[in-house]
């Protein structure tokens, strides 16, 4: 079945450091890929998405590129801030024959802590 | 604020009891999804409704059931509760199955 694997956390960085959180997936067809962020005590917020190969999703300085050849969707940010401290989830939504199945399959989440 | 509301925010109950979690989707969204977030299982899809009809089922226990009403709000019913059912339960909604899902703040269920 479909699955998403994220790099193990937690990740601890100093402010203005470069961030990479690795994400790889297994899916049939051509899934849509997402990064969601969960701040302490809150629900999940969509950070960015990509719906086809070579698409780049970007938002708030975060970027991720849909790489079909490596089945990856790594999250990057050039300069993190303390306010970026949160849990980051990579997810996929399977598609087949032009039909989206809707349900999201999530990775295990990566805790990011940014120190001043 | 995603526009998805969930009640209650917290729920504490005892083993063997039954509870109902409620979700109101964003205005205009026809599809509702339920997810469970626990420390050992992570975030798992439970069930999806679209315009009142069940569309997909995931790892939902037989003790759990859900429905979507004509006004599009949804309820998740959990019965014969066990300690292991303690988790955060999220509702998400989208316009259609293919659209981006927006999540509510969740209901934290504690079974004692």
Image (spheres, grey):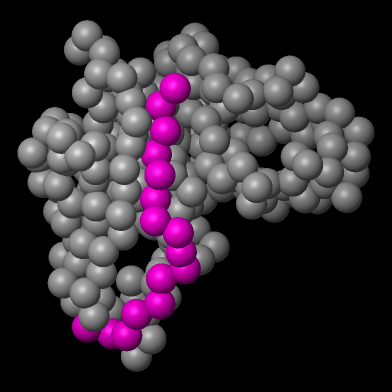
Question: Closer to the camera, A108 or B89?
Answer: A108
Q: Where is residue A53 in the image (x, y as percent from the top left)?
A: 12, 33
Q: Residue at x 81, y 27 (%)?
A: B79
In this view, B22 is above or below B70: below
Q: Would you identify the image quadrant in which residue A91 lies? A: top left
Magenta region includes residue A39: no
Question: Closer to the camera, B2 or A67?
Answer: A67
Point out the stretch of residues depicted in magenta: A1-16
Q: Position of residue A112 (x, y in %)?
A: 41, 69
Magenta region includes residue A11: yes
In this view, B71 is above or below B2: above
Query: How many numbered markers are drawn?
Result: 0
In this view, B54 is above or below A37: above
> With B9 as the anchor, is A105 left or right in this view?
left
Q: Position of residue A66 (x, y in %)?
A: 16, 41
Q: Residue at x 49, y 21 (%)?
A: B48
Q: Which residue is drawn at 21% across and 74% down?
A: A18
């Amino acid at each position: 079945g479909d699955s998403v694997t994220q790099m193990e956390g937690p990740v601890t960085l100093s402010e203005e450091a470069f961030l990479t959180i690795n994400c790889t997936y297994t899916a049939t067809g051509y899934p849509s890929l997402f990064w969601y962020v969960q701040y302490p005590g809150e629900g999940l917020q969509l950070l960015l998405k990509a719906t086809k190969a070579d698409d780049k999703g970007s938002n708030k300085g975060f970027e991720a590129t849909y790489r079909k050849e490596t089945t990856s969707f790594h999250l990057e940010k050039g300069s993190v801030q303390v306010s970026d401290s949160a849990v980051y989830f990579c997810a996929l939504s399977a598609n087949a024959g032009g039909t989206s199945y809707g349900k999201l399959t999530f990775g295990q989440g990566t805790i990011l802590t940014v120190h001043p | 604020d995603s526009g998805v509301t969930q009640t209650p925010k917290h729920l504490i109950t005892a083993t063997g009891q039954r509870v109902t979690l409620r979700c109101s989707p964003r205005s205009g969204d026809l599809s509702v999804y339920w997810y469970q977030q626990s420390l050992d299982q992570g975030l798992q899809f439970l069930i999806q409704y679209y315009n009142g009809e069940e569309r997909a089922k995931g790892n939902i226990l037989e003790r759990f059931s859900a429905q979507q009403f004509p006004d599009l709000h949804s309820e998740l019913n959990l019965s014969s509760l066990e300690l292991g059912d303690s988790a955060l339960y999220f509702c998400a909604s989208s316009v259609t199955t293919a659209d981006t899902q927006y999540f509510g703040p969740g209901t934290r269920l504690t079974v004692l």
